[in-house]
Structures are given as C-alpha cells and as structure tokens.
Amino acid sequence: MEFDDSEKILNKKYGKTGRYFLFLIIFLSIMEILDSYTTIFPQLIPSKVVEEFQLEDFEYTRLVGWASLGLYFVLFIQFLADIWGRRIFLFITLLGMGIASVLMYFSNSPLMFTISLFFLYLFFSADIYTIFMAEESPKKQRSTYTNLIMVFGVLGSIATILFRMIYITDTSPIGSWRGMTYFGFLAIPFAFFAFKTKETTAFQEFKIKRSSPDYKKEKMLKNFWKPFQSEHRVSFIIILLISFIIGLNEPIGSVGELLLSEYYSPEDGTLILMAASVFAIISYLVTGRASDKLGRRKIFIIYSAIFPFSIFLLSFGIKSDIYIISLLSGLFGLSIRTFISYGLLVQTRLLCIEFLPTKLRGIGTAWRSTIFAMGLTIGLFINSKLTELLGDIGLAFFLVSLLFFAIIPLAKKCKETKGIDVIG
C-alpha cells in the first residue's frame, strides 16, 4: 500500500504497520470468500428446492421475495456501525452468516427455508468489510484495493461451483442441496479472528473528534436523514436510484438457475455458472483499475449500455435448437451480466463512502443497501407475476433489464469522486 505522508503519520499513531495491513487484507479476503459463498450458494439450488418442496417457479420466486426483506435490517446494522464502530460488526455479521447456514441445513419446509434465507440476506448484505477496506486503503488506490478484496472473494464463488458439482447432479437424491451449506458453517469459528483487527483510522479519528468538548452532539436518530442533507446529497440520491435499478435486475442472480435448469443439464449449468464466476474475478480487477483511471461515472455509463444485451443473450439465445449457440449464449449472457452487476454494486458502495463524512458512512451505505433491497424485493415480485402471466422467466428478466438504460443519464449528473480524501 502506497500511503502519502499524512496517512503514514496516522498509521504510525495507531500502531498500524505493514505486517498489520497484510493481516488485514488476508482477514478481509477470507471474510469476503465466506460472504460470497453464503451470498451465492442459495442462487445455485432453486431447482432442487423446488423439486423437494413441490413448488412452481413463480412460487419459489415469491418465496425469495419474502426472504429478501432481511436486507432491510441492514439499515440498523450499518447505522450502529457509525456509533459503535466497524470492528464489532465484522464479528457479528460473520457469526450470523454461519448460524444462518446451519438453519438452512435443517430446513424441512418452505417456511423454514424462507426464514433461514431471510437471515442469510440480513448478514451477508451488511457490507461492513467494504467500509473497513475503503477507510484503510490509500486514497489514490481506494477502488483498486476495495476491488482486490472482491477478487479474493470470488474464490467463494468457485467454492460454490465445486460443491454444486458434488451435491447437485442428474443422480443426486432429493435434499442433497443441503450439502451446499457446509462451507458456510466455517464462518462461525472464523468470526472470532475479527477481534485481532483494529478499528479503522477514520473511525478512530472520528471518536477523538466526538469526545472533544467542542463537538456538537446530536440525537442518534437524526443521522438517519443526514445523508440527504449532506454536501453531495444530489449525487447520493442518484446513487440510490441506480442501486434501485440494479436491485430490480438482481432476481436474475437469485433465481436465474431456474432458467438454466430448463435448457441445460446440471453439468452444463455448472459450467455456465463457473464461467460467470471467472468473469466476476475479471470484473473486480478491471472495474477497480478502470474506475481509478477513468473515473466512476464512465464505468456506470459503459456498463449500463451493455447490460440489456447480456440479458437478451441469456433469455433468448439459450432457446436455440443448435446446441453450441445455446451453450455460448448462456455462457456469455450470464458471464457479461455477472461482470456488470458485480462491478457496479461495488462502485455504488464505494461512492457512498466517498460522498459522505466518516460519521455518516455506515448509515449512508445502509441506505444504499436498503434501496437496493427494495429493488430486489419488488423485482422478485414483478418477475414472479410476469413469469406467471407470460409463462417465460427469461422474457421477464429481459423486460426488466431495459430499465438499465435509465442509469446512463443519471450517471452523467453524478459528481466524480476518484482520489477524494475519506478522512473527515
């Protein structure tokens, strides 16, 4: 990490050495692996859950819609992170991911499955590690290091593919999908390593400022609305609108496996999902570097223009009677979709951190998570209804994807933030 002189002084003040930052990167990388795994494995089992509980596709989509309400409680986790600090919530969210995975293993009804998925949504969406990395990175390399953590996290995606190859095949018995939860159990013991980390420099500086006699204390609940009164409130609201649109299209990630299972064998479906995981790695590498070089706004504009094309490939190309065309359409359609969605989600988190002062970053990213959750929930119910009416889940995905074109004019009005200082 290449810190400037002022950053080096602060790191020395809090005893943060090169060895500590190496440990921090390793810890956050492993946390992201577990976070990615618990985020993705529920996306790879819908067809088997539908088979066990005898559900229709639109019924399962609606079930996930109810479970997605867990995302709304992220607002409180990140609000408290602005009061108590980031470090304690690294522990809480990791522990929660592990416990939710155990609950899913024991699910024996659609209701219990929904409840366990609700808790997974709650804890894997907290994004505390993103705030942690962004506040500890050198300001000129913030997007690069934040995305670097995500690159390691894609190992979690690869782990889901490996477990899927074992537990979801043509011959796997009903209920074998529960084996996908095993890896998530590791989050429970790993959570205790969070106590080896140190609070972020930005939050430690804020605590000093907060404890000074000159600091003007305010009621905690006022901070809920402060992001909308900040200097960059217009850009912040734009990011929320963009997050909502991304959320509307995220059902492809949550229940898209249902579409793949209609046209491919489990083995071919696994191949396509593996390709998408590789593209996620590429996205983090490319998006982080390009964002620091070209700026945040250009990334939003370019990616948003391409997104509907990827869904067109995924929704219609896979219906081809020619096997190789069908397979390539699925491969490139889902891979490009994953590349864009993963890249833009990290950018929305990063911009919330860059737009807001330290005391509002937790609640600011919480608003982003909540608005994204609203998009996801509404998108799931819209897709459920469109699939029921049209009888084609792929067509439902494509119609909703056209909303991505609205991101282009929104991004043009958003303030550029590359290289901005986050201490303050």
Image (cartoon, grey):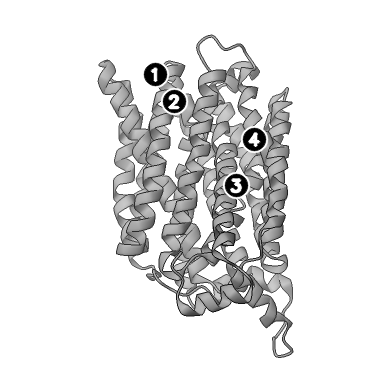
Task: Assess whether mark 1 and mark 2 are in contact (beta carbons under 8 angstroms).
Answer: yes
Q: Amino acid at mark 4?
A: Gly
Q: Is residue 40 visible?
A: yes
**Residue at mark 4 to residue at mark 1: CA–CA distance:** 29 Å
- Residue at image location 25% in from the left, 22% down from the top: 325
The residue at which mark 4 appears reads as: 184
Q: Could you tell which of marks 4 and 1 lies nearer the N-terminus?
A: 4
Could you say whether the residue bearing mark 4 is in a helix, strand or loop?
Answer: helix
Judged from this view, the residue extending furthest toward the bottom is: 214
Q: Is residue 183 left or right of residue 278?
A: right
Could you say whether the residue bearing mark 2 is in a helix, strand or loop?
Answer: helix
Q: Amino acid at mark 2?
A: Leu
**Which of the 4 quarters of the picture holds residue 124?**
top right
* Quadrant of the rendering where the C terminus is positioned: bottom right
Q: Could you tell which of marks 2 and 4 lies nearer the N-terminus?
A: 4
> Which marked residue is nearer to the observer: mark 4 or mark 1?
4
Q: Nearer the viewer, residue 409 or 415?
A: 415
Question: Compared to 284, does 198 lie above or below?
Answer: below
Could you say whether the residue bearing mark 3 is in a helix, strand or loop?
Answer: helix
The residue at which mark 1 appears reads as: 263
Q: Is residue 391 visible?
A: no
Instruction: From the top left corner, tell me how far across and down residue 358 is, in percent.
Output: 59, 72
Q: Is residue 190 left or right of residue 290?
A: right
The residue at which mark 3 appears reads as: 31
Q: Which mark is residue 259?
A: 2
**Residue at mark 1 to residue at mark 3: CA–CA distance:** 34 Å
